[in-house]
Amino acid sequence: MARVKPDLKYGQPVSEKDWARFWSFVSTPDENGCLLWRGHLVGRGYAQFGFKGHGYQAHRWSYSMLVRTIPKGYEIDHVYARGCRSKACVNPEHLQAVTPSENMRRAYAVKFPNAKRHRPPLRPRLTPPEAP
Ligand SMILES: [Zn+2]
């Protein structure tokens, strides 16, 4: 039988052993203040942490245990504006819960810093008739 992965909740009990294991995977801050995960990485470089028999993204685990419960449907952004430069970072001060669309907007803004925020209209605007 497949076990349902429980949602992480701020304030839920975490054993000393689990805390020690978590921090044992975390590097000292790099030049950006990032706390990089030295343990298992999955997908496009996201840190993975095994907790109570389930695999969690380590940055989500960090945020949930150290900041607050992640609201339903929210994603965790590695906030570029706070200096974060790595998806493998678990520094709670670099993390923020945002909606998926906000997360995508920020990622786009970082990737294409010179892109205009709004695209020009596809069709040229009709010139209003000149006033007499
Ligand atoms: Zn960071």
Image (cartoon, grey):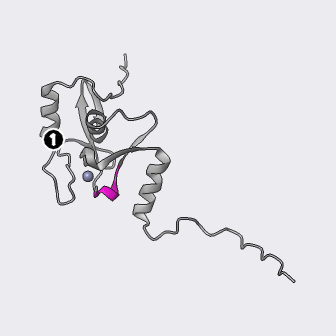
Give the percent coordinates (x, y) of residue 16: 13, 27
Give the percent coordinates (x, y) of residue 88: 26, 48
Q: Nearer the viewer, residue 129 or 21?
A: 129
Relative to 114, 34 lies left or right = left
Give the percent coordinates (x, y) of residue 19: 16, 31
Mark 1: C-beta under 8 Å from nearest atom of ligand 1: no
Q: Residue at 16%, 44% (x, y): give it.
A: 26
Give the percent coordinates (x, y) of residue 11: 27, 27
| SS for dot 1 | loop
From this viewpoint, which residue is outermost toward the bottom? 132
Q: Is residue 24 above or below residue 4?
A: below
- 81 within the magenta span: yes
Q: Residue at 25%, 24% (x, y): give it.
A: 53
Q: Residues within 10 Å of mark 1 (few under 14, many from 20)?
A: some
Q: Is the N terminus in the top left, top right, bottom left or bottom right quadrant?
A: top left
Q: Nearer the viewer, residue 59 or 67?
A: 67
Q: Is the C terminus in the top left, top right, bottom left or bottom right quadrant?
A: bottom right
Tell me the amino acid under the disc marked 1: Phe
Relative to 127, 8 lies left or right = left
Figure disc tally? 1
Q: Residue at 21%, 25% (x, y): give it.
A: 14
Quadrant for residue 59, please give it.
Answer: top left
Q: Identify the residue position indicated by label 1 in the image.
A: 25
Q: Which residues are magenta?
A: 78-83
- 7 within the magenta span: no
From this viewpoint, which residue is outermost toward the top? 1
Relative to 52, 106 lies left or right = right
Q: Residue at 25%, 36% (x, y): give it.
A: 66
From this viewpoint, which residue is outermost toward the front? 132
